[in-house]
Amino acid sequence: MKTVIIAIAILIVVVGGAWLYLRSEGPAYTGDAAGTAPELTEETAAVLLEGYLFADCRPEGIAESYRSCTLDVEKENGRWIVTVVYDGFFDDSVQASRMRAQVTYENGAWRVGDIEEMQKCWPGRGHQDFSVDLCI
């Protein structure tokens, strides 16, 4: 139980720090010199969000952390939405974590905007949908 509390505290500190950092300027990733809006690739998205991700998003997972991770990029209303889902946490409460980040291309650089972080609980440990509510 003590491990769960420590893990939740670390998650809160990381998410809070990322949120504060994003409220300043956010990271920029410079694209081509012509200033045209290129397609946002999964590789570029991973570089942009490197400081915000729980760990490298690898499909095979990382021992002692999670079983799988997916990173999806889609365009929605002129903005790119990057969704990262870590699933199968080796935790007794949290089953999965989802981060959704808005990314735009402005003045020749990629900009990370709002980031939304949610979690999903294991059955019997709280909500079964992604939510900001804590698992029990």
Image (spheres, helix red, strand yellow):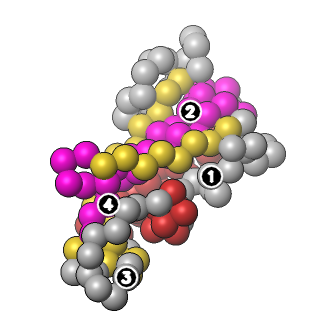
Residue 49 x, y percent position in the rendering: 47, 63
What amino acid does circle 2 point to?
Answer: Ala
Q: Residue, x 49% and y 66% (percent of image)? A: 44
| Mark closest to the chain's N terminus, 4 or 2 | 2
Give the labeled residue for mark 2. 96
3D distance between C-alphas at marks 3 and 1: 25 Å
Give the labeled residue for mark 1. 57
Classify mark 1: helix, strand or loop: loop
Res 89 visible? no
Q: Quadrant of the N terminus?
A: top right
Classify mark 3: helix, strand or loop: loop
* Closer mark to the observer between disc 4 and disc 2: 4
* Closer mark to the observer between disc 3 and disc 2: 3
3D distance between C-alphas at marks 4 and 2: 23 Å
**Residue 26 image-quadrant placement:** bottom left
3D distance between C-alphas at marks 3 and 2: 36 Å
Badges 3 and 1: C-beta atoms under 8 Å apart?
no
Relative to 42, residue 122 above or below: above
**Residue 63 image-quadrant placement:** top right
Q: Residue, x 34% and y 68% (percent of image)? A: 38
In the picture provided, is 60 more to the left or to the right than 85? right
**Residue 88 image-quadrant placement:** top right
Which segment is the magenta one? 76-105
In the picture provided, is 107 more to the left or to the right than 55? left
Q: In the rendered structure, does residue 107 fall within the stretch colored magenta? A: no
User: For mark 1, does the 10 Å Cα neighbourhood hold few (<14), some (14 to 19), or many (20 or more) residues?
Assistant: some
| Mark closest to the chain's N terminus, 2 or 1 | 1
Give the labeled residue for mark 4. 103
Give the labeled residue for mark 3. 32
Badges 4 and 1: C-beta atoms under 8 Å apart?
no
In the picture provided, is 65 more to the left or to the right than 52? right
